[in-house]
Image (cartoon, rainbow, N blue to C red):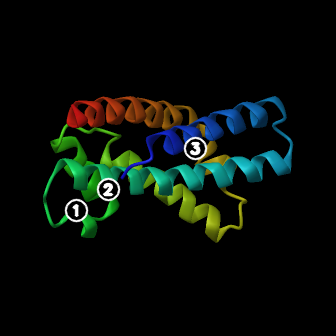
């Protein structure tokens, strides 16, 4: 079962952390917190999307789909999150951040966070609508 309220809290956590980091852009602590929330929401979003697709479709291939394939499948099912290319870029930003021990976050991920947040918020709304219709 999808815990949509928990997902919305994760997205809200990202939004708040972005706001705090913007007010104190030189804070290493807030930059680290923002990097962490970005990674958490990325992983949680992919898990929630996979769970939603399993509820909405009986396709046995869903558990084994890669990230890009998952985004394409979601779009085909009317549960659009973002483009496969954008999702893979977000994932690449996370991997680069891991490789550089956080040194690349500002350069590779921070510029994309407003769009990323908008996509997550829109996805949460669409998912809530789909799950509400499914339950009715």
Question: Is label 2 in a helix, a strand or a loop?
Answer: helix
Q: Which of the 4 image quarters holds residue 77?
A: top left
Mark 3 burial class by Cα count in 10 Å: few <14, some 14-19, many 20+: many
Question: Is label 3 in a helix, a strand or a loop?
Answer: helix
Residue 41, given in percent of the width and then of the height, sits at: 54, 49
Asked if labels 3 and 2 touch by Cβ distance under 8 angstroms, the answer is no
Asked if labels 1 and 2 touch by Cβ distance under 8 angstroms, the answer is yes
Q: Which of disc 1 and disc 2 is earlier in sequence?
A: 2
Q: Residue under circle 2?
A: 50
Taking 19 as reference, is 90 above or below it? below
Image position of 118 (left or right of 82): right
**Residue drawn 48% across the image and 54% down it:** 44
The numbered mark at residue 10 is 3
Kindly report the distance in space between the C-alpha atoms of the residues bearing marks 2 and 1: 7 Å
Q: Nearer the viewer, residue 85 or 80?
A: 80
Total numbered labels = 3
Kindly report the distance in space between the C-alpha atoms of the residues bearing marks 2 and 3: 17 Å
Residue 114, given in percent of the width and then of the height, sits at: 56, 32
Image position of 15 (left or right of 52): right
Q: Quadrant of the C terminus?
A: top left
Question: Is label 1 in a helix, a strand or a loop?
Answer: helix
Q: Nearer the viewer, residue 2 or 89?
A: 2
Q: Residue under circle 1?
A: 62
């Amino acid at each position: 079962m999808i815990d949509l309220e928990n997902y919305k809290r994760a997205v809200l956590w990202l939004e708040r952390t972005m706001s705090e980091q913007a007010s104190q852009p030189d804070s290493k602590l807030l930059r680290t917190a923002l990097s962490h929330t970005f990674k958490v929401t990325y992983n949680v979003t992919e898990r929630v999307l996979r769970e939603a697709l399993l509820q909405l479709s009986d396709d046995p291939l869903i558990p084994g789909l890669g990230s890009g394939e998952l985004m394409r499948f979601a779009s085909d099912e009317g549960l659009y999150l973002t483009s496969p290319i954008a999702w893979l870029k977000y994932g690449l930003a996370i991997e680069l951040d891991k490789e550089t021990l956080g040194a690349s976050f500002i350069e590779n991920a921070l510029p994309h966070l407003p769009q990323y947040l908008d996509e997550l918020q829109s996805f949460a709304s669409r998912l809530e609508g789909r799950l509400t219709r499914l339950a009715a």
